Every structure is written in structure tokens, then in C-alpha cells.
Amino acid sequence: MKKKSDCTIGIDLGDRKHQVCVLDRDGEVVEGKAIGSDRDALRTLARRFPGARVIIECGMQSPWTSRFLLDLGMEVIVANPRKVRAIWQAERKSDKRDAEMLARIGRMDPRLLKPIRHGSAEAQQELLSIKMRDALVRQRVNIISAIRFTLKSLGHRVSNPGTARFHKVVLEQVPAECVALIEPMVGVLAEMGEQIKRFDGLIKRAAEAHPVARHLQQIVGIGPITALYFVHKIEDPGRFPKARDVGAYLGLCPRRDQSGDCDKQLRISKTGDAFLRRLLVSAAQYILGHFGKDCALREFGLRLSERGGPRAKKKAVVAVARKLGVLMLSLWKSGEDYQARMA
């Protein structure tokens, strides 16, 4: 068995090549070079420096890379890119300097990197299926907008039956000379609709098979997509000693700029996962909307919006979204059933 290396390795991940910087126990650079962005190159690095601490920055390739290096016995720290200002604010930025800076910060105190925890490969697959569905939904909206704009420019208007049914009715509402023009795009919409339904079925089955995600769907406004995404992104509820701490993690708490007697009231930080934050905000908008069911969360939000003032409704939506996150984590920790009048 090889002796565990006491080196610290910073890796700046790239699409074709990774830039590597290796520091010894005294902080001296013992190696700095580019390696291939494949498993064989990482496996060779792990053999040369067994058990070494590796610092990488969170990005597109960091999930599989971190899991692969962990399986090879390395100590892996995934740095939060929002916290590594010494890198992205450097006056002379390069991949080589970035790799060395990651290694030096990781060698000094990894907590400065605000490490990010990636989930399992199975969790990533389910998260990606949700994001792929979202990409299809967004593209469908863009295509419908393009069709509407085209018809409007020709002097024709169509009804608004909803995105899921638009392709079924639009051809019946336009003159025959316009059918050939928009028919190809309408066919694409029909195929998109089928694929979105397929993703909906996959996500719903995954959420039903996950006991926590199924439990969280008791909450008004929380469906399988939001519940499953929340569970996989949080992964371990014990990460948060207090349920309220999840609000800051989601980026739904105000930023703070306090100095002396000055303590400014700023807007929310928008840190963390933007997609999860969008899901919670959408759920909050549903709760406060015309079709929202009567519950304590709705009453709380409506009271805030009735106070008036600039952006009162937007503030109410954000506050309800934050409470939703706290409520979901609380139910997860306690295992209790949701009581709509006690939210």
C-alpha cells in the first residue's frame, strides 16, 4: 500500500485540458502542468499522489470529477466559485495561476473556499432530467412566441389556449395560405409536448419512489419536480443545525453590509442554486395567486403584500418562498405531516 501523499493539488478544470498545480507540505510548487480532461489522466495523477488533497472549482465537470477522484482515494474539496474572489478578481488571470491559487487556499484553510457537496450519480441523473424538461418547456414557449409573431405580422391573431394545447388548435384558426408556413413548427411543438410528458412521467415516478420527496408533496404548491429537486440538492438535512439556515443557502435572505452604526437593508443574495430558487418562487406565486388554496402560508403572504410600499408583492413572494424552504426542511427533519393551518 502506498504511503499517503501530503501534497495539495489545485486543478483548474477545462473542456480539453486540466491545469494542475502540486504543492508540497512546505507550500513549494513541485509540479505545474496541463493534463488531459479524461479519466485516464486523473487516474495517473491519483497514482502519483495517493490520498492527496485536491481542490477543484464547482462547474460543469466538477460533479463526475469529484466522485471519480473520491473513488480513487483522494480528499476532494469543491470550491464555491462565488467565494474565490482571489481568483476571479486577479489582475493577471490564467489557468496556471488559478490552479496554484486553489492549491494555496486549500492548503491554508479549506473553509475559505466554502466547499460545495455534490450528490450521487443517481441524484445527478434525476436532477438533469428535471433540467432537460425545463429546457424543453422554455424552447416550446419560444417557438409559440415565434409563431404568434409571424401570424401577427401577417395580420392574423390566434387564441391563447395554453402552451400544452397550442399546437392542437392553431392550424384551425389561420387561413389556408398560412398553414404551410407554420406547419413545420407546429409539428415540432407536438413532438416537444410528447417528450415533456415523458419527462413528467419519469420525474413523477422518481418522486413517488423517494419517501422524502413524496412526503414533501403534502405542502400546498409543492409538486414532484420541486420536491425531488429540493431533496437532491439538500441531500442531508443535518447540514443545517437550524431550519431557518436553509433560507440563506437558497439565496432568499437579504444581503448585509454592516459597518459601525450603518446597517444597510439590501436585496436578497441570490446565492446557491438558481433553479431551485426559481422553483420555490414559482410555488410561492401559485400559493398567492387566484388558484392558491387557503392556508397559513397564503395568509402570511397576503398580509405582507397588503402593507403596500414599493415592490410589496414581490417581497411577499420572496418571503413565502423562503418560508416554503424552511417548512420543507422542517418536515424533512421531523417526519411530521403537513398542517396547512400551522405553516
Image (cartoon, grey):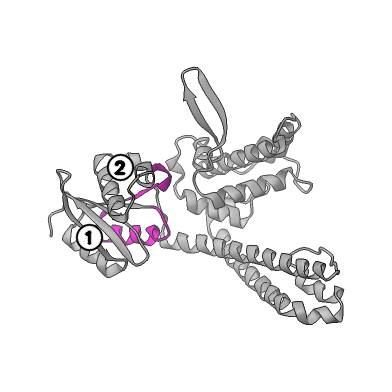
Q: Tell which residue pokes out farthest to the front in this image.
A: 91
Q: Is disc 2 in contact with disc 1, using a CB cutoff of under 8 Å?
A: no
Q: Quadrant of residue 295?
A: top right
In the displayed structure image, the side of residue 73 where residue 117 appears, left or right: right
Start-end of magenta stretch: 58-83
Front residue of 291/309: it is: 309
Indicate the position of residue 303 as horizontal and vertical percent values.
73, 32
Indicate the position of residue 90 as horizontal and vertical percent values.
35, 44
Magenta span has 119?
no
Residue in the picture at 84% in, 81% down: 177
Front residue of 177/116: it is: 177
Indicate the position of residue 252 as horizontal and vertical percent values.
56, 39
Tell me if residue 307 comes above or below residue 132 in the rendering: above
The tag on residue 33 is 1
Residue in the picture at 65% in, 72% down: 192
Residue in the picture at 54% in, 64% down: 129
Indicate the position of residue 164 as horizontal and vertical percent values.
73, 67
Front residue of 159/165: it is: 159
Q: Quadrant of residue 176?
A: bottom right
Q: Residue under label 2, please give it.
A: 110
* Label 2 vs 1, first from the N-terminus: 1
